[in-house]
Amino acid sequence: MAKILYHAVPVPWRKEEKYARLETTASIAGVKWTKLTPDKKGNWITNDTDEEFDTFLPIGSKEAKAGTSVPTVFRTYSLGVSTNRDAVVYDFDAKRLAKRVEQFADDYNAELHRWQKKGRPKDVDNFVSYEKIKWSETLKRHLTDEVEAKFSAKFIRKALYRPFTELSLYNDTLLIDRPGMFDEFFPTKKSETENSVICLSDVGLRSPFSCLATDKLPDLHLCASTDGFQCFPLFTCTEDGKERRDNITPKALTLFQIFYDDDGITRADIFHYFYALLHHPAYRTRYAENLKRELPRIPFVGVVGRVSPLRAAGGASVLASRLVSSLAPPAQFFPLAAVEKMQGDATPDHNPKASAKLFHAFAAAGQQLADLHANYESAKEFPLKRQENKAVKLDWRVEAMKLSKDKVSLFYNDFLTLSGIPAEVYDYRLGNRSALEWVIDQYRVTKDENGNITSDPNRPDDEQHIVRLIGQVITVSVETQKIIHALPGIAFAAEEMAICPENQMA
């Protein structure tokens, strides 16, 4: 049987230090090895939190998606939209997008007809021209299936390409390699006003775990250039959008209602509880390693023992939820097995009534966060100071914005500098960037290798859109931090300590 031997260098080491160690270590014989035994999931590097994490309710599974009756929070989910040709099917301007897609369709159809006239050669890879078209395995398969491209404006939909970056997307299965299940999540434009999805880091992530709620079609790499994102909708729809199917499973609804002894808990409550929990610093910190290799599992947040409701952390409103007073018992995470003690003559380990107050506070916080993030363009502008360069003509056009070294000011363009950016803005991070830095990165003019403009975020019909967006995203970032810091602290008995939002990064 093969043995797995492992040696770790200090975590803070940079690659230069690691290379130096390899050069100075003459032989593996002198290395101090640790023998590893893979766990039942095949993980050969295990974490102290693995067993604990496994006791929580899975948010989803391949088995549940396939129709097997297993306990999960969500019935189904999907990766974000994977186009394999972003430069063709995405654009800030819908008219510019339509023109480019029409040209792409003409070029593709020309290749299809040329392939047909040449007797349909089997070696498609060496037959097609790569000068005008970015081919992929999927597009070549469409060609050999003799599928013609037909442009239709109805396929142009709003999409969230990167955090707080809305683009128009040509959502057609011919041009998009892997459209995901969004024909069930957002089949019509009307469904975008009714449904919502929580997008979160997929397994194997390279960037820090992140999540973001939206009511638009989300891109596969929503909050990272390399990591994929899985999307969990509140409900799914028929093709015409007229019929819905709940995506929070009946089993999950029952489990939450039993644990909290509250039949009034709804699927929407669970959806928003889930979103708040994923933002809680204690959850992200404690299970950071688990979230790198598997989808989140959801604990029940509760209060230990039977205490007076007046002493229990509570209040369904988020602003009232600086929840845990010095007299109240701390909130804790409870496993799925805790539900069993709510049945028969067993005595539960938690106070259901006080715990229900915590649940509803989390749900209210999650709803505030989801509304804030999905409707970011409705947020009030943060009152930044505008410094105008009188030597330059008034101009709202952006080429490429840049932060000052201290990140207090933003050089918008030669005419305008925005200052007074609060430091807490940079604490709201999605992947490796803050929300504001994502907007700065995406809202710039880029050109292709031939010098042609391939992306321009400026709107001739709304010249101040970008400067307004900057203020709105700053407000969203500040308000997000306030909501997160208002969540209850979580105590972990093993460490006899509480990890509270006030002393952790979000």
Image: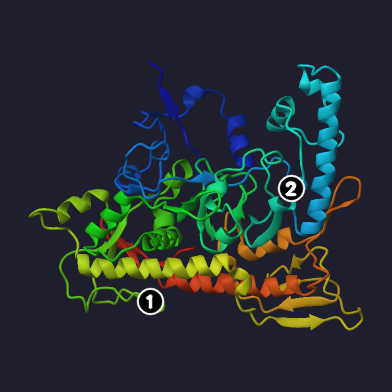
x 40%, y 75%: residue? 318
Mark 1 Cα within 10 Å, few/some/many (few <14, many 20+)? Answer: some
**Callout 1: SS:** loop
Foreground: disc 1 or disc 2: 2
x 44%, y 57%: residue? 278
| Image coordinates for residue 506, horizontal then vertical, percent | 49, 63
Up-down: is 117 above or below 160?
Answer: above
As measured in the structure, the alpha-carbon distance from the residue carrying label 1 to the one carrying label 2 is 42 Å
Quarter placement of the N terminus: top left
For residue 246, side relative to residue 358 (left or right): right
Tag 1 residue: 317
Q: Is residue 334 visible?
A: no
x 35%, y 36%: residue? 68
Up-down: is 17 above or below 219?
Answer: above
For residue 323, side relative to residue 133 (left or right): left
| Image coordinates for residue 402, horizontal then vertical, percent | 76, 66
Circle count: 2
For residue 317, side relative to residue 146 (left or right): left
Give the amino acid type for the residue marked by disc 2 in the picture: Val
Tag 2 residue: 89
| Image coordinates for residue 283, horizontal then vertical, percent | 40, 57
**First-in-chain label (1 vs 2):** 2
Marks 1 & 2, CB-CB < 8 Å contact = no
